[in-house]
Image: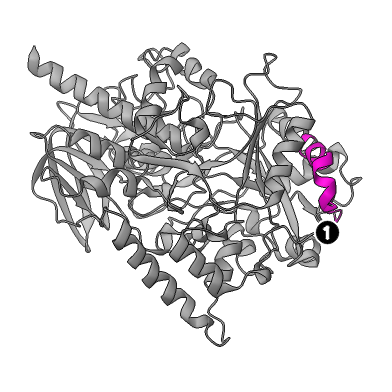
Amino acid sequence: MGIQVLLASTALKTVSVTGLWLIPLLLGALTYHNYSSYDPEARVLDKDPKNEYDFIVVGGGSAGAVVANRLTEVKNWNLLLLESGPDENEITDVPSLAGYLQLTKLDWQYKTEPTAYACLGFKKHRCSWPRGKVLGGSSVLNYMIYVRGNRLDFDQWESFGNPGWGYRDVLKYFIKSEDNRNPYLAKSKYHGRGGYLTVQEAPWRTPLVAAFVEAGVEIGYENRDINGEIQTGFMIAQGTIRRGSRCSTAKAFLRPVRTRRNLDISLNTQVTRILINPVTMKAYGVEYVRHGVKRVVYARKEVILSAGAINSPQLLMLSGVGPANHLRDVGIKVLKDLPVGENLQDHVGVGGLTFLVDKPVAIVQNRFQAFPVTMNYVINERGPMTTLGGLEGIAFVNTKYANSSGLWPDIQFHMAPASFSSDNGQIVRKILGLTDEVYDTVYRPIANKDAWTIMPLLLRPNTRGYVRLKSSNPFDYPIMNPRYHEDAIDVGRLVEGIKIAVKVAEASPFKQFGSRLHMKPLPNCKQHKFMSDEYIECQVRTISMTIYHQSGTAKMGPSWDPQAVVDPRLRVHGIEGLRVIDASIMPTIVSGNTNAAVIMIGEKGADMIKQDWLNRKKR
């Protein structure tokens, strides 16, 4: 996290150096010109909602954009998509500028609850949780990494009593969305061509990522397509980019269908409550605020929540659907007692594992000249500004705790050719919320030096957190506690993951660069022998970083599952005309970056709605 801003700092400097103040204006103008000249998709039209629709979709993010697209394929259905934030802009298109979007109006700017178990190197012991408040949702803020998860994840979902969610069933939905432009995958039965979502490798990379993949092979893993038959292995990352620019779900699924007469999109429109008849227990509309005015809009068929794993449970609870005792505590009338907001899961990583190199091969802000780098991106769609948020390599590895088959790895690596201080402390430390003590002690001494990092992340945590309401006010941010590292095995897996990462860095492919571990201990861990298990555990708890993958807070499961909120067709138990279609429904988090899986959920959810309503007509 945060590495993506290093290149951004190069392109968007506004310091008083002759000519550089023109770069932001030039970037915006030329990117817009480039977009208008070569991209057939224009921005969506922002409309005031009418009084009634067949379907209302709340949230225009990774799932909601897909649902809106697919349901309006039925020409005699009309649909309203409500999005709390604005549309994307020219800057959001630039992959390397993702960090500049955090802590802006496009970001909900959430923070976790303080904890004694994790986030100890961040201010007030709170982790930052950036979430997209923009059309396209977190697909506009993320690293664009395209990872589907492990086939065993989906088979496990099915084994929990969710028929139709096994890997053999969901694979077709991944393929349906995809337009994979990597030539070496063109004939793979696991990939699609011609879908709405463009997937490809970034057109620019450092030599460090080749060494990363070669090192993985040297220590016993294969260089393979991690979205293919077997996940375990190393590869150069694939991402959701198109011609060097971000391919968000808004760009992929909404802009091409913006002229459909049965689709209305309303931006900067915050839904505050789902309207549910307390007698019939049927959802019939939503209450929303637009331009400071509270209104309602009605749904003839269904209300579909696609607001994400934080806001979907928040809206359910505000509407009287949730844990009865908690709703009473905040003064909300209980309509349906369900475990909404429980089962919260996230991928938590360990940041700060840094390796120094002697050769000028990493991303160092001061090395790049702003004007030529920007022009290369704008004119040629090439260069360092096309990097996937600064990430270049992906790997899935097995610790001693992993499944004995070797086919269900428990740790993922993100490899980046930079450190926390490659931007000289300008942005990365701020968006992470690093304390001054940690930054000044460990990272300031290597500012602007060539370095690279591996961030191990925990794929399937044992801990389960929660989302709860702070009050009955829909504009109060909810309480979010992921309960990071309260389970000893979770910590143990990450300790082993760091050991494997060091093994990768010590392999022969990195010797050509003079790669070596940065040996400065974290100030709160210096009582332990450096890189002992005790020290590594302290690092795990100190620099605990979200990978933006919150999920599970409206768990999918059959009626006999006491933890389930929605059934296998994503209908809220006990409430007619209400579904949840987003990361909230995951019974267990998928093994890998979640955006691709959420898009799949949107595809499958839309198909189920079509089946339910169109088959009803035929009967």
Q: Position of residue 542 (x, y in %)?
A: 72, 49
Q: Which residue is mark 1?
A: 358
Name the image quarter holding residue 28: bottom left
- Depth check: 114 or 233 in front? 233
Q: Amino acid at mark 1?
A: Asp
Residue extending farthest right: 529
Say whether residue 88 is magenta.
no
Which residue sits at x=30%, y=21%? 569
**Is residue 86 at all visible to an observer of this figure?**
no
Display colour scheme: one colour
Q: Between residues 13 and 362, which one lies in front from this camera angle? A: 362
Q: Let me know if residue 502 is in the magenta part.
A: yes
Q: Whole-percent x and y of residue 308?
A: 39, 41
Q: Quadrant of residue 359?
A: bottom right
Q: Position of residue 198 (x, y in %)?
A: 40, 42
Q: Label 1 neighbourhood size at 10 Å, few (<14), some (14-19), many (20+)?
A: some
Q: Residue at x 24, y 30 (%)?
A: 578
**Residue 225 location, x and y as percent?**
57, 29
The residues colored magenta run: 500-520
**Residue 50: in sight, yes or no?**
yes
